Image: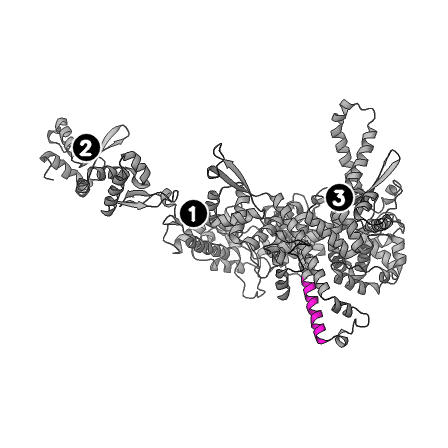
């Protein structure tokens, strides 16, 4: 955790939950895991108030706690969950995503869960409609988004049935998950507890054997840690009851009203379980959105739509877990077939005219021709044969599917249409697979029309690289980007080698290298030629360290975000008078009549400034996710 | 030529039209009356002594080369020091010789050496060249020779300096060429303004030899560029993120450029390009509230 991240988290908590909470959080972040009395001493606030604050923070999952029961004297330690604090920034995105997918009602439910941290379903349903107004309307950084959806969301929900229906849907899609005991504890404590348990199980071990056993124990601990979370993901609705009896914690429990193969609507929700928002799921969604955007810029709009559809299927088949190193996919890579994509893809998308066929290459001479006298005739030819391009195979490996098509021309027109659509989708997917970034990978299986997998981890790495290069380009210019890419590609290089590869003069690149080195994008290794280590007799090799650059970048991001939030505060402060007037209940809605011309202008100006700042904050947030979470 | 004996003169006259050729002693013997080895010996000695002939070693045998009359006159006019210097410079051929090496080899006093070089250069016998490898060294070679690639640095160098304008112009041209081959021509009906890609498996992207050929035929430059040179250019374009390798690295394709695409946000905000970012601190003299860059940025809505 970096200093700048601490600052940002403190600001976030202050903006959302007030000064008191932020002070406690600041202390926890600064000193790390502490017991209550230590916090009280450091924060210099009465114990009672600190306790109240901690309750709020725990309710919001911002603080984790764990009680050690050693020797009868229990001590509870508190630890800040700073990643969860950062998630406060995402509330706007989360609500928007839900709104897009499930409508405003679901969005308002999710936004309420976000505000509450976690809530028991029965309480939530009972309080609905009354509590939405009474709730502390937190000044979240993206307040505007939330209040907007809240305003629209409060009215239409009328019955508890409706709410629970929405909640069931959200749970099935894993947007809401039941809170488990280990959600409230620091990971390391959970792991230690399990380790303790596992070690105790291995009775009668001598000290000599212990080292031997260590590996076995480690494996077992890792396994159990994994099962903690997979338990949640893999749990089907039917299986739930069984595992519920284990720990006596309230959990998701749904009654099966009919036996196997029951419809979704028949699931019912148990009022006693406690739900929270599943942030990891949203991170995965944001990641997929980013990948789609990338495809759009690299290949084209239509292909990106196909890709989005593919990723949507992928998303339903996997669960991502959030770890320190970002999102980790659990289990096997899911395979999505072309058929799946075809089933859900909108029919209105023009799949055909978004790819040009490059057929003439196969008939020999054209290759030479087009390089001698320009490609015009060559392309004309391509257009001529556009109509029957479906008969041409893209890859050898899809041939079997095609031969079937050519054989049966008497298919009904609807089936024929479907077939054509699938073939076109496959073309787009093949394009994605062929791209140098390999957006999809062909799955070797017997699926008709082919199955596809996506290596998100690798793609995100590439995405990061691309982003980093863009940042370098904007900051240091094209030559610096060229140099960084050469260093990355070739490994360690001295100035001369760099200059030769980059086709630039040594004296021209020196300044760029210096600037890059200063900001921590590249690093230098010195290799002395002689024992004296004279600077003149030393090789200087430049190298690129992705991890270090990533950390340096994140640190800058956090700092920049803190500054933006401070600036938002500053802008508010400057306009306090105006804003308090504008927010008066009698003025609200009648601004035109009650405010002077200057005030209106100032208000508009302030709004624009705030929008710009918040927009910028979200753009950097996207980059933080890219560098840290994905 | 009057200084030569009749026999030597005949041999010289017979061989001089072909003075680039290397003669073995057997070939010379053909011009000697009665093919008498004794006379050959005398003649060769005479010619060598007067500088009309040079001995060279080819493998294990000695060969001879005739020197043109002008060259002989030239060397004859030189002082002995100058001749010595000239000889060394001549022996360095197209590589050229560094003045410092010349000094150690000839063992002449620096002032003498400088004088010799001056006169030789003045008479256009030798010229000073610049080496890419050692830009500070003063290097001499015979005036009528062209320096080797190691000395000049290849096609990218003009006067031992990397010709940045030339390279940039070529880069732009090559990029345009590859881009024109990477995407299909827009159909007349398609006025969406978007570039559509070729389908997967398309193999019409230009290869290295295609591009080299195009550069050769395009009259872009008189400099002869080999495939290796073009590859260096393409590598730079790849490092610039303008091209990428396709079809197993054998062909090249331009990367699609989007007008007005969403860029990363960090450097667009003041902080991303703030010169005093490291000094910025909440309670410090530079902070978010009094930041002039924010002020400016927010004003330009």
Residue span colored magenta: A595-612
Front in this rendered view, residue B232 or A119: A119
Spot occupied by residue B109 in the image (x, y as percentages of width and height)? 27, 37
Spot occupied by residue A325 in the image (x, y as percentages of width and height)? 69, 43
The chain to which mark 3 is attached is A
Q: SS at mark 2?
A: helix
Spot occupied by residue A149 in the image (x, y as percentages of width and height)? 78, 62
Front in this rendered view, residue B188 or A268: A268
| Residue of label 1 | B229
Q: Nearer the viewer, mark 3 or mark 1?
A: 3
Question: Of label 1 and label 2, which has the lower sequence position?
Answer: 2
Q: Which of marks 1 and 2 is in front?
A: 1
Tell whether position A217 is magenta: no
The chain to which mark 2 is attached is B
The chain to which mark 1 is attached is B
Front in this rendered view, residue B77 or A363: B77
Spot occupied by residue A597 in the image (x, y as percentages of width and height)? 71, 76
| Residue of label 2 | B27
The answer to which quarter of the image holds residue B271 is bottom right
The answer to which quarter of the image holds residue B99 is top left
Asked whether residue A420 is in view, the answer is: no
Q: How crowded is mark 1: few (under 14 residues within 10 Å), some or many (20 or more)?
A: some
Q: Please state if A162 lies on the left or on the right of A284 as rendered.
A: right
């Amino acid at each position: 955790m970096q200093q700048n991240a601490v600052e940002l988290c403190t600001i976030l908590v202050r903006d959302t939950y007030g000064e008191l909470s932020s002070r406690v959080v600041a202390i926890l972040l600064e000193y790390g895991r502490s017991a209550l009395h230590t916090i009280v001493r450091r924060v210099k606030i009465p114990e009672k108030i600190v306790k109240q604050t901690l309750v709020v923070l725990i309710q919001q999952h911002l603080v984790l706690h764990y009680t050690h029961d050693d020797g009868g004297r229990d001590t509870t330690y508190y630890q800040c969950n700073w990643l969860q604090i950062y998630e406060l920034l995402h509330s706007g995105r989360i609500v928007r995503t839900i709104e897009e997918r499930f409508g405003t009602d679901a969005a308002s439910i999710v936004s309420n869960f976000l505000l509450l941290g976690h809530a028991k379903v029965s309480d939530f349903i009972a309080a609905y409609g009354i509590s939405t107004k009474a709730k502390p309307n937190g000044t979240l950084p993206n307040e505007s988004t939330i209040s907007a959806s809240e305003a629209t969301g409060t009215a239409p929900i009328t019955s508890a049935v409706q709410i629970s229906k929405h909640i069931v849907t959200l749970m099935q899609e894993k947007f809401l998950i039941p809170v488990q005991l280990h959600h409230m504890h620091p990971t390391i404590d959970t792991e230690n507890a399990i380790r303790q348990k596992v070690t105790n199980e291995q009775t009668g071990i001598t000290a000599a054997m212990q080292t031997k056993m260590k590996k076995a124990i480690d494996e077992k601990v890792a396994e159990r840690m994994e099962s903690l979370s997979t338990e949640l993901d893999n749990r089907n609705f039917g299986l739930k009851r069984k595992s519920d009896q284990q720990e006596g914690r309230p959990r998701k429990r749904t009654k099966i009203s009919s036996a196997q193969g029951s419809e979704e609507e028949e699931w019912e929700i148990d009022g006693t379980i406690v739900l929270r928002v599943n942030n990891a799921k949203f991170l995965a969604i944001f990641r997929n959105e980013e990948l789609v955007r990338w495809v759009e810029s690299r290949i084209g709009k239509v292909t990106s739509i196909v890709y989005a559809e593919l990723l949507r299927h992928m998303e339903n088949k996997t669960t991502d877990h959030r770890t320190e190193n970002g999102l980790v996919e659990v289990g096997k890579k899911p395979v999505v077939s072309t058929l799946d994509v075809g089933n859900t893809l909108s029919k209105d998308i023009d799949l055909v005219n978004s790819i040009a066929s490059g057929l003439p290459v196969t008939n020999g001479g054209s290759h030479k021709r087009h390089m001698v006298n320009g490609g015009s005739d060559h392309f004309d030819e391509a257009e001529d044969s556009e109509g029957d391009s479906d008969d041409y195979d893209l890859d050898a490996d899809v041939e079997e599917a095609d031969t079937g098509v050519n054989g049966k021309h008497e298919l009904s027109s609807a089936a024929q249409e479907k077939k054509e659509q699938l073939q076109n989708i496959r073309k787009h997917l093949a394009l994605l697979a062929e791209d140098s970034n390999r957006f999809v990978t062909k799955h070797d299986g017997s699926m008709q029309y082919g199955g596809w997998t996506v290596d998100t981890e690798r793609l995100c790495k590439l995405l990061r690289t691309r982003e980093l290069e863009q940042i370098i380009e904007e900051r240091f210019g094209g030559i610096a980007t060229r140099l960084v890419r050469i260093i990355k590609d070739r490994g360690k290089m001295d100035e001369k080698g760099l200059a030769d590869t980059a086709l630039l003069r040594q004296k021209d690149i020196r300044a760029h290298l210096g600037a890059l080195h200063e900001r921590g994008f590249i690093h230098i290794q010195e290799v002395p030629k002689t024992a004296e280590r004279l600077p003149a007799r030393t090789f200087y090799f430049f190298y690129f360290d992705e991890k270090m650059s990533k950390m340096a970048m994140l640190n800058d991001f956090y700092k920049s975000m803190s500054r933006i939030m401070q600036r938002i505060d500053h802008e508010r402060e400057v306009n306090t008078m105006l804003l308090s007037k504008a927010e008066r209940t009698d003025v609200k809605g009648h601004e035109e009549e009650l405010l002077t011309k200057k005030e209106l202008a100032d208000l508009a100006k302030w709004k624009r400034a705030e929008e710009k700042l918040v927009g910028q904050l979200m753009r950097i947030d996207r980059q933080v996710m890219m560098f840290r979470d994905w | 030529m009057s200084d030569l004996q009749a026999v030597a003169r005949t041999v010289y006259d017979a061989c001089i039209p072909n003075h680039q050729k290397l003669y073995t002693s057997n070939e010379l013997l053909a011009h000697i009356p009665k093919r008498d080895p004794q006379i050959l010996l005398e003649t060769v000695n005479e010619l060598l002594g007067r500088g009309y002939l040079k001995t060279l070693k080819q493998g294990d045998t000695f060969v001879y080369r005739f020197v043109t009359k002008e060259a002989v006159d030239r060397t004859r006019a030189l002082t002995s020091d100058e001749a010595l210097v000239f000889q060394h410079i001549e022996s360095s051929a197209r590589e050229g010789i560094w003045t410092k090496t010349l000094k150690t080899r000839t063992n002449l006093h620096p002032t003498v050496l400088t004088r010799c070089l001056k006169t030789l250069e003045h008479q256009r016998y030798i010229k000073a060249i610049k080496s890419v490898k050692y830009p500070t060294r003063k290097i001499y070679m015979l005036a009528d020779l062209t320096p080797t690639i190691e000395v000049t640095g290849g096609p990218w160098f003009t006067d031992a300096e990397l010709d940045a304008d030339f390279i940039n112009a070529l880069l732009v041209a090559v990029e345009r060429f590859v881009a024109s081959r990477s995407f299909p021509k827009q159909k007349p009906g398609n006025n969406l303004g978007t570039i559509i890609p070729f389908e997967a498996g398309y193999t019409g992207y230009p290869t290295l030899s295609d591009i080299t050929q195009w550069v050769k035929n395009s009259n872009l430059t008189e400099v002869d560029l080999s495939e290796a040179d073009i590859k260096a250019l393409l590598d730079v374009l790849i490092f610039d993120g303008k091209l990428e390798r396709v079809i197993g690295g054998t062909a090249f394709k331009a990367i699609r450029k989007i007008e007005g695409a969403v860029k990363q946000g960090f450097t667009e905000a003041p902080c991303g390009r703030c010169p005093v970012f490291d000094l910025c601190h909440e309670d410090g003299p530079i902070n978010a509230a009094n930041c002039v860059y924010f002020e400016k940025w927010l004003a330009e809505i």
